[in-house]
Image (cartoon, rainbow, N blue to C red):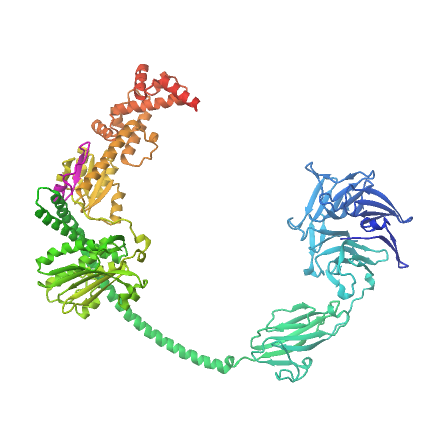
Amino acid sequence: MKRFILLLFSVLKSGRYYYYPIDNASRLQYSQNIIKGLLLDGETLWCGTNKGAIYKFDTRTKKYQLYYQYPKDMSIYAMIPASDGGLWLVGSDPKIGLMHLSAQKELQDTFPSKGGELCHVPSSRCILKLRDGVLLVGTRNDGLVKYDVVNKEFTYYNTDSPKPFRLLSNYVTSIIRDTLGRVWVGTFGGGILLYDETKGILKTITQEQGLIDNDVCAIVEDKEHKLWISTSNGISKYDPDNDKFVNYNSLNGVGVYEFTLHSGTLLANGEVCFSGNNGFVTFNPHELQQNSYVPPLVFTRLVVNNEIINVGDETGILSSVLDDVVEIELNYDQNNISIGYCALNFVFARQNQYAIFLEGYDKEWNYIGNRREAYYTNLSPGTYEFEVKASNNDGVWSQETRKIRIIVHPPFWKTWYAYLFYVVVFISVLVLIMYYISKKQKLERELQFQQKEQQQLEEFHQAKIRMFTNFSHELRTPLTLIIAPLQELVAMPEFSSLVKNKLGLIFSNAQRLLLLVNQLMDLRKNQEGKLKLHVTKTDMYPFLLEIYYAFNHLAVKKSISFVFEKKEENLLAWFDKMLIEKVVFNLLSNAIKFTPSGGNIVFSLSKTILSALPVESQKELALPVKTEFVCLSVADSGKGISKEDMKNIFAPFYQGEDENKENVGTGIGLSLTRSIVHLHHGIITVSNNRPTGTVFKVYIPISSFAYNTNELVKEDIVEDVIPADKSAHFDIQKKWTVLLAEDNEEVRQYVKESLEPYFYVLDVGNGKDALDLSLEKYPDLILSDIMMPGMDGLELCSRVKQDLQLGHIPVILMTAKSMVVHIKEGFSVGADDYIVKPFSMDVLICRINNILESREKLKKLYGRKFSPEAMGIEIVSGDDRFTQSFFELIEKNISNPDLGIDLLSQELGLSRANLYRKLKAVTELSPTELIRNKRLEVAAKLLLETNYTVSEVAVYTGFNSHAYFTNCFKSFYGYSPSEWVQRHNNNKEGR
């Protein structure tokens, strides 16, 4: 900050200085004598202080006179004369920087702009008159401000302005105009600028161009038109004609270490004066001579790997002093070096500058200031040439350079004979690689052959799977005819307990047969990764006992001793009942099949822990040692299994050698068994029994933590077919008509007989006959099989749902396909329900009744709120679309008194009878009732939403008689039209 304790004048010739304080009082000497700005006007020196005061100092009488006092403390940094005899001032107030003090001592700190607003220029530091009526002000935080007093126009230059009006810093410290009329602007942090009133910033000069520092304090022009610039670090001499700099700082003998902002002037004798933190410095530019001496260079020292190298030391690098050495040889591990050098100029020696260049390493000369040592690390083996040049304290560079060659020898593994060895090794490795590639290609060909062979085997395997899967689908239909009648027979009370037991056994084994049919599809699911666990907590003993009883009858028939041994009375375990039933079924079936008459089978249940299992099994399971397992063992006294067959017995479709061809199976049971056991995180083992026979053991964990959370089910999953209960009575209010379409005559006859006690049943054998009969009889529901000759069930369903007359009829599809993709296919054509064979007749009757009851409720709803829009529903189904078309036609002819069934039949393309039946099926109302109700609905809306009279509404809605309209309206809504309007108006007022 510019700060003068006393106002001083120097007598230049005598070199004597005199001090003229404003106030001699000791307690006010410091604060009252700080002068920030000066203006010499003839024999009057205007002085601006840090307290906002302006004094007139008479240079003849050496007396001060207070001219003006600003109301609050503010530093007055600069003053220039105004054209009206007043002064232009700039001060440090954060809000008010530019001020005008008139000759009458009237202060103006806001100025009009073109838009009519009064503007101010905040905290300012310097000011320059560009021309009459145009000022250039330098601010503390807002850059440059140009103010045209006549045109009332402000122009701003700051860091946010676009080029060419952008500054590098918003702190402007100095503004001068040189003798050639050029305006130079000094900024703190942004160097100096060449300003042009019309073109903006013509040039920006910073440290990159040679300025000693970017923090400019003041700019002074000498008598030779050179610019002297004081900065935070020193003084720069700038020649604008050739853009050259000469810099001076404390190293050149300048005694001021930090210069003051806004303080610098050219004295009358040609000397330049700048103030600083410890006084001020003056100098005559003519007396500053440039040192033209070009100093010679010498090498001073060498450092290798951080060790100074001396002549004749143990390294042997230097045989004489470094300055006399032309070449240095180094080993590959001596590649971190530094070379010292010095210019022999002792005039301000610290100002000597150096530049270095290492050929083979550097791309250009490096100017490193006054650093007298060059550092290079990790030099690669090779030959380098180090060069250095220097300048004296005034920047005069030598044209000649000092050079020294540096050779870094490579390690032995980078020598020519090492590379020769590498080439030999490379060729040898290449030969080995070629041999390996040839061998690999041969192996790949063999592997491709084996893969092709394996692929053929897999295709054959898949063909067998598809064959058995398709076969299992074909078995589902006859199984329906077996299981469904058995359900009824078991439920009949007429049979004795003995007959019922036999029938129950037949029914139970028929279900087992269905499980066998599903086994093939389970194998397919397992191979496709679609077989999932549904684990429940169940008592294992009664579960296995039920299976034992089912097989005991077969064992007695074959004269086989079949024993169920249990070591645990109650054994609660987590497992999938359906899948474990298939495991036990397969094992017991095989045991009975391969055990001769008079033999014995032992089926046992026990509990064990993981540590009691074979070591190989423990590694395979990877469960905690104390994990509890249930062990299911099936031991028979049959022929047994050879060691060769034991290796492949669990492979799909594997069949061992057996002299008895009747016992040869399909080879899928044990494969599916092992897959199910592995799904349960268990193992299955097989061994020979003593003296003859086979022992299968299944180990599965009984704790829930062995399974994933998504595999656990809270309740048991029951998939048994529930027998029909003849004593059960279905409360069906109405006897609807059901159309049955089934190509299998036996199935069709059985389903028809089961449904006839509750429904009128029409039966046909194919889809085409079903469609024709539907158009003739209009049934309440269609029950159709999918697989039928000619038109299948999917096509029939699609045709029904797309037909305007039949679209309201619900359709139930029957099929033997139970996979999700098949069910999705049925629903995609518009089916209302989907039932999989074999199915329970009781369930089918309930489904039919529920669907028709729902449709009956919907018809009643349509009778009351027959407009789909009034119900707030989306038009999706066929009967909704028909209803929409029907009511749109009524609304179109709402005012036509002749609107009736004949007009509607003609417009909709239906006969009178078909239209009447269609409307009764959908809404339970006749066409005449629907037309009347729709007219009354429109009339009710018009009465509430318009100002029409009752008579006008009656005529608009097609009623010829006012009295008839009133009677119909009161019969439908319970109020006369006038009462209807009055009631709704009262409700609105009540809200």
- Relative placement, left or right, of 569 versus 268 is left
Q: Is residue 755 above or below residue 629?
A: above
Front-most of residues 848 and 266: 848
- Relative placement, left or right, of 412 versus 600 is right
Q: Is residue 186 visible?
A: yes
Q: Quadrant of residue 385?
A: bottom right
Residue 751 falls inside the magenta stretch: yes
Q: Residue 640 in the image: state x and y as whole percent.
A: 15, 67
Q: Quadrant of residue 635?
A: bottom left
Front-most of residues 922 and 398: 922
Front-most of residues 98 and 735: 735
Q: Residue 490 in the image: state x and y as whole percent.
A: 12, 45
Q: Quadrant of residue 839?
A: top left
Q: How many marks?
A: 0
- Relative placement, left or right, of 911 versus 973 is left
Q: Is residue 735 above or below residue 3?
A: above
Q: Residue 816 in the image: state x and y as whole percent.
A: 19, 48
Q: Is residue 952 visible?
A: no
Please report the bounds of the magenta region as a residue range.
724-752
Front-most of residues 797 and 698: 698
Q: Residue 801 in the image: state x and y as whole percent.
A: 25, 38
Residue 422 falls inside the magenta stretch: no
**Quadrant location, the C terminus:** top left
Q: Write the residue at 18% across / 59% down.
A: 586
